[in-house]
Image (spheres, helix red, strand yellow):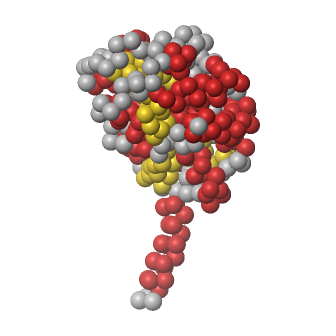
Amino acid sequence: MRKTIPILATILSALALPAAAQDKLTVYTYESFTSEWGPGPVVEKAFEAECGCDLSFVAVADGVALLNRLKLEGSGTEADIVLGLDNNLTHEARETGLFAPHGADLAALQVPGGWSDDIFVPYDYGYFAVVYDTETVKQPPASMKELVEGDPAQKLVIMDPRTSTPGLGLLLWVKAIYGDKAAEAWGKLKGRVLTVTPGWSEGYGLLTSGETPMVLSYTTSPAYHMIAERSDRYRAARFEEGHYIQVEVAGVTTKGAANPLAARFMAFMVSPGFQDAIPETNWMFPAGQTTEPLNPVFQDMIRPDKPLEIDPAAVAANRKAWIDEWLAAMSR
């Protein structure tokens, strides 16, 4: 028996390994999502309480960097779920073959224009905007044209479209308005650009630290200052040409499709348990139903009647060329 007990324990331990592996879910996302003030800690606590599992976030600088990392890792990725891509990247991400159908019920989603994708599930949405410091900027730009042709002394911080979804969003916003003349617009705008940051967090921090009077962000960003800081110092400029929409999404990887927790998380993501965390931690509009109505402050945030958007297939086909165009214009 003394020899049998260790052998039996070894067998039982080996049998338990697959089950233990299924008790963990790995989610790749972006840094601001997992920060102490972001939705990550709230989501992690709520999901772990529901599933009795270990939810592990792995963060990179921003959303485009997520897709870049996944492409590099390929089928060997540790990610079960990638959370933080957006509508501009869904076609390109789908074409990698690294994502599986989500199987989630989308009936409760409330995304402008609707949503019917079988691979990617939205968890929030918003509109890109130039956010400015009212103590420094007395006459904010009222259009993209005024931003592009405005005073070069009044600086702007933007994000890199090669790594950041807001950076890519601005690239597409300019392209949607200027079309074939986008390079000319970038050539004029570059004089106002103080710096280009890898991700949103670094860029927005330059606004709140007083190092720039304007930054690329979202129409909902002022809600944070109004609710958390009780301040209306920072505002979003309304552009007459309209604002480009961003719908943030998550997808199950082909590796994650074998983990039952992935499907469970996707169902959780569109439920109030997840959606309740979005408005006042990610400071975006929730894509699904929340337990309580949004703070009235959100009613004052800019919501364009007809948001600008370029078809994801066109973005996938032209993203490299448009980024090269941006790089050339910014380096002249």
Q: Quadrant of residue 157?
A: top left
Q: Quadrant of residue 267?
A: top right
Residue that appears at 64% across and 52% down: 71
Q: Position of residue 52 (x, y in %)?
A: 42, 49
Observer-nearest of 95 and 251: 95
Q: Position of residue 31 (x, y in %)?
A: 43, 44
Residue that appears at 65% across and 20% down: 178
Relative to 226, is 288 on the left or the right? right
Q: Quadrant of residue 120?
A: top right
The extreme left residue here reads 230
Is 242 drawn above or below residue 154 in the view shown?
above
Q: Is residue 165 visible?
A: no
Q: Position of residue 242 (x, y in %)?
A: 56, 14
Is 72 drawn above or below residue 10 in the view shown?
above
Residue that appears at 69% across and 33% down: 315
From the image, which quarter does the N terminus lie in? bottom left
